[in-house]
Image: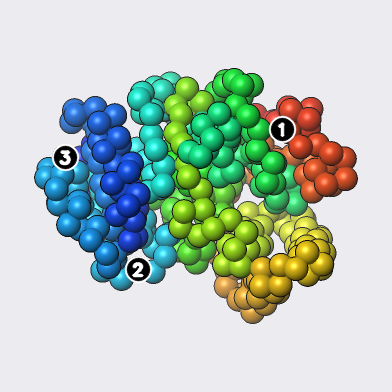
Amino acid sequence: MKKNSIFPTYKVAIALLCYNNRDLLEQFLPEVISTTPQTEDFGIFVIDNASTDSTQDYLSTFGDRIHIIKIEVNKGFTNGYKLGLAQINSEIFCLLSSDVQVSPNWLEPVVSLFDSDNHVAVIQPKIKSWHNKDQFEYAGASGGFIDYLGFPFCRGRIFYHTEADTGQYDENEEIFWASGACFFIRSQVYYESGGLDDDFYAHMEEIDLCWRLKNRGFKIMACPASEVYHIGGAVIAYGSPLKTYRNHRNNLIMLVKNLPSDELLPKIFIRLVLDSLAFVNMIKRGQIKASFSIISAHWNFLIHLPKWLKKRKELKSWVVRYSKSGIYPNSIVLDYFLNGKKKYSDLQWTPKKMKPLK
């Protein structure tokens, strides 16, 4: 835990990042405040990522119930957290998106799970749709996984098919990645691992961080007893060219940084081929702008490949073992589009558990 802040030290610090989101703050911040215990263990921080609207005027109405961290220049989602978290002293960070509605008792189950197992580094709650509260939400559902080629999916969501929540994924489960919509992490682990990669700017930065932690031997957990509701696409719309670009580029960077050496070249090659097929499919469907975002993502990835390889080299000493825990051994693309497996339960797969740290 860092000790270089003007703010008090907490066990749990809720860090809500916003940018020109006064409307979302008005809608959701009061519930964050009302559901957070008013004890010395919990603190609420709003990291204002250089907003130009009246966000600061609204935040000032809460007095000392919240702490405000003002970022002077917006350099992206990851940079906002990088600069904001550096000013917070806490045992546990909760990275909370501004478009998330929390529920009563959303904090207690998560803190209890952390206290029960020191090997747990990251936890996410169950994430459901704010628009349809009986439905899982795209960005996380009840915990994230990847297939052997790095395509992400969730308990409760595969590609754009989301399931109704009937309690089928209500048990605590070791997962591969936790959603950045509501992301709890031990601060010491955050700093030791290097935190969110600022080159990602936004999208898949949390999967990259979780993969890094898995390769170190830590556990990532879903805690469905904690429940939140996510609007989704409130900042960058799902399916937009910008989101398509960042998802494709950042996924490739993530593979370079975290795959074992013997898997790196074959899987990068396969991904480039599959992405090219996705480009052709988007052209056929008339998604011209989004399709050319894939080409731009590939060019950026290849032009800066020496940079990504340098990151990989720097991480080599961090890796204890390249984890297979939470990696689906088949292709989720083929299973979904060709084999009709739309639900997580259709996969009939039991993820490997993380071996305990020595």
Which residue is painted at 54% across and 58% down in the image?
Answer: 237
Work out how far the residue at label 3 is from the one at label 1, CA to CA, in angstroms: 41 Å
Q: Secondary structure at mark 3?
A: helix
Q: Residue at x 71, y 32 (%)?
A: 344
Q: Which residue is mark 2?
A: 74
Front one among 261 and 198: 198
Nearer to us in this view, 238 or 95: 238
The extreme left residue here reads: 63
- The reply, left or right, for residue 168 in relation to residue 11 is right
Q: Is residue 242 above or below residue 63?
A: below
Q: Is residue 98 above or below residue 312?
A: above
Residue 356 lies, in percent from the top left, at 57, 29
Residue under label 3, please give it.
Answer: 65
Quick check: 286 left or right of 145? right
Residue appearing at x 66%, y 68% in the figure: 290
Q: For mark 1, what is the residue?
A: 344
